[in-house]
Image (tube, rainbow, N blue to C red):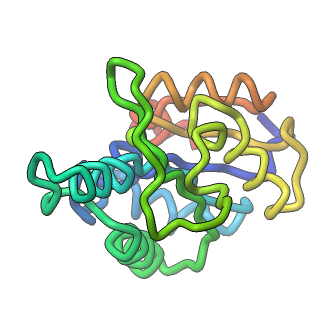
Amino acid sequence: MENIKGIIFDVDGTLIEWKTTILLPGVKEWFEREAKKYKISFCSNQGGVGCHYWMKEGNWGDYTTLPDEASVENTMESINTQLGGNYPWFTCYAYISTRGKPAPTPSHVTHWMQEWDLAYRKPEPTMLLLAACSLKLLPDEIMVVGDREEDHKAAQRAGMAFMWADDFFNEGEW
Ligand SMILES: [Mg+2]
C-alpha cells in the first residue's frame, strides 16, 4: 500500500451514520492522525434526491423525509467542518429502484448534468475516476473505502484498491 497517495471515501455508512451528520467511531481520529498524508475526496450515491423528486412530481409517497440537493450539500459541508478539511466531494442524485426502474430526471434539471446520469452512479466507475482527476492521481494510486458492494465494484472497475470501512477505521492498520 506504499504507493497509495489518495483515498476516496464513500459517505453514508462509511464516514457518517445513515441519514445523519454524526461521524462514525474512529473517523475523526483517523483524519486527525492520517489525513495530511493523503489527497482525499468523497464520492457518494445520493439516490434519495432522485427519489424525492420522483415522488414529489409524481404525487405519490412522502418525499419530505428524503434529501434534496441543498440538504446533501449541507451534509457534505458539515462533514468537512467536523473533519477540519475542505475535501472535494462528488455525488450522484440519479435513482434506480431496487427492481431496476430508473426514476425520471426532475423537471428543474433542464440540461445534462453528471449528477443526474445513472452512468455516474456507483457501481459504475465514473464518479471515482472524476474524483481521481480532480486529485490529479492515477487510479492505481488510490484506495476506495466503502461499506457496500457498489463501492467495492466501482473501485474494481476503476482499477483502484478497496478496503471495507469497518476494517479501515477499526483495525488500526492505518
Ligand atoms: Mg455507504
**143 lies above or below 88:** above
Q: Which of the 4 image quarters holds residue 49?
A: bottom left
User: Which one is nearer the viewer's eye here, 63 or 88?
Assistant: 63
Q: Give me the residue at 22% from left, 60% from top.
A: 20
Which of the two residues, 75 or 104, is positioned nearer the viewer here? 104
From the top left corner, tell me how far across and down residue 10 is, in percent.
Answer: 50, 46
**Residue lying farthest to the top in this orientation:** 99
68 displayed left or right of 73 = left
Q: Is residue 171 left or right of residue 68?
A: right
Q: Residue 55, percent across and down?
A: 22, 50
Relative depth, front residue between 84 and 127: 127
Name the quarter where the C terminus is drawn. top right
Quadrant where the N terminus sits is top right
* Above or below, comparing residue 49 to residue 163 in the picture: below
Which quadrant contains ligand 1?
top left
Residue found at x 39% / y 33%: 166
What residue sits 61% from the left and 22% below the top? Answer: 153
Spot occupied by residue 157 in the image (x, y as percentages of width and height): 74, 24
Quadrant in the rendering for residue 56: bottom left
Residue at the spot x=43%, y=28% of the render?
148
151 vs 13: above or below: above
